[in-house]
Amino acid sequence: MLTPANYWVGKHNSDIYTYELLKSGLEKARPLDMLVSDSRLLILQANASYAFAAALWRSKLPNVSQAMTKLWHFSRRAVWLPPSVIERAQADIVYSILLFPVNRLPVPIVLETDFNHWGIPALRTEIDRLRYNPPWIVERSAVILVRHQASLDALKEQYPDQAHKGILTPSMLPGCEAITEEQLTAKFAAFARPVIKVLFVGNAAREKGVRQLVQAYQALKERYPLELTVVSRFSDGPVTFPPDVRVLSNLPPAEVYRLMREAHIFAMPATRDSHGRVFWEAMAAGCALLAPCFTPHQELFGEFGLTADPTSLPDVVRALQGLVENPGLCSERALSARKAFIQKFHHSVAINTYYEAFRRAAAQPRPAGFHGR
């Protein structure tokens, strides 16, 4: 399997991180090699496309006409993938999250993407443009992977004649294991003795709602024994915190998982978040969740805690208070979150689903003259 090269955006880019997780999970468990192309031509194209689309976006030209909008969508995703690269890699399929070859390839293409609305209403126009999947990409994909039911339903609605390509696949989290039920019970037996531990984890802290959460914490900390820990790289700008908030950066995953296992509540009232991989990690750690109330978070996580409108501080305060003053509700929803993670989101489930999707794509007929594996 071959993946197109990504942009220069750095190792913490979410798409690159997704490739790394998928590679580490699948290659250890299934007879599969996942290769990221190092073709200089492909990398040059990808960076040039990214730069052109970024300039087009900043110029606001996509708002001028429908033609400009289509040009922006095309320029940010289109690359020409040399067939020789596929031959050298002996690739059976090409897999991508964003970049899509404009030329006809001798192997099937698997696209992982999103089709549903997400984010607060004020960001809807911008986000809908970012997540838009042009018809030519959908038509040329052999298999389309989506991470939750709302996205699959949106694919069926937008492209009913291509809906058969859609496969529901949870995010790959190869290092994430659920705590035992005994550990979860012991954690909540110590609820408020001496503190109720609230945890936030999000690299883009501002858009993930850290400021709203800190304000809610300050409104409640005099009435409840709260301890707030924030883990972030602050990639979207610095944030000022009161002295009693613990702030940590650049932690390895194992340390983040340790903090999650200790936390009673995982809170991330994000204004902009597509599907929330970190919520699944918190579910495995036995946390009750405070999540944004928009789709898909309401459908995915609403039953495992409480949801709030991230643009309304009183609503975030209400949700946080609803959890901290009710340990029974907290422990019940944390227990159901842990169970749902094991059944639906554990890496063993993701590995099987991804592998069968890739097998399905690889089994499709190839053009004559291709001599891959």
Image (cartoon, rainbow, N blue to C red):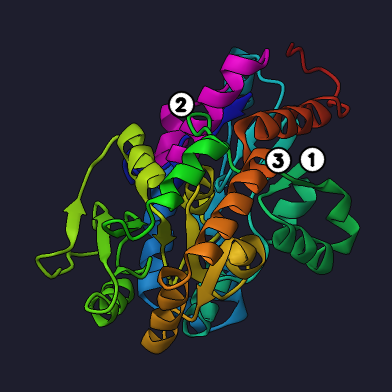
Q: Residue at x 59, y 42 (%)?
A: 171
Q: Residue at x 28, y 74 (%)?
A: 217
**Can you tell which quarter of the image residue 346 is in?**
top right
Q: How dense is the environment of label 1, judged by Cα within 10 Å: few (below 14), some, or many (20 and up)?
A: many
Which three-letter amino acid code belongs to the residue tagged 3? Answer: Gln
In this figure, which residue is indicated by the disc labeled 3? 343
Q: Position of residue 75 (x, y in %)?
A: 52, 57
Q: Position of residue 165 (x, y in %)?
A: 83, 47
Q: What SS does tag 1 mark?
A: loop
In this figure, which residue is indicated by the disc labeled 1? 142
Q: What SS does tag 2 mark?
A: loop
Looking at the image, tell me whether mark 2 or mark 1 is earlier in sequence order.
2
In the rendered structure, which segment of residues is drawn in magenta? 17-44
In this figure, which residue is indicated by the disc labeled 2? 39
Q: Nearer the viewer, mark 3 or mark 1?
A: 3
Q: Residue at x 67, y 66 (%)?
A: 299
Q: Is residue 129 visible?
A: yes
Which three-letter amino acid code belongs to the residue tagged 2? Answer: Ser
Instruction: Tell which of 85 and 270 is nearer to you.
Output: 270
Looking at the image, tell me whether mark 3 or mark 2 is earlier in sequence order.
2
Q: Position of residue 160 (x, y in %)?
A: 88, 63
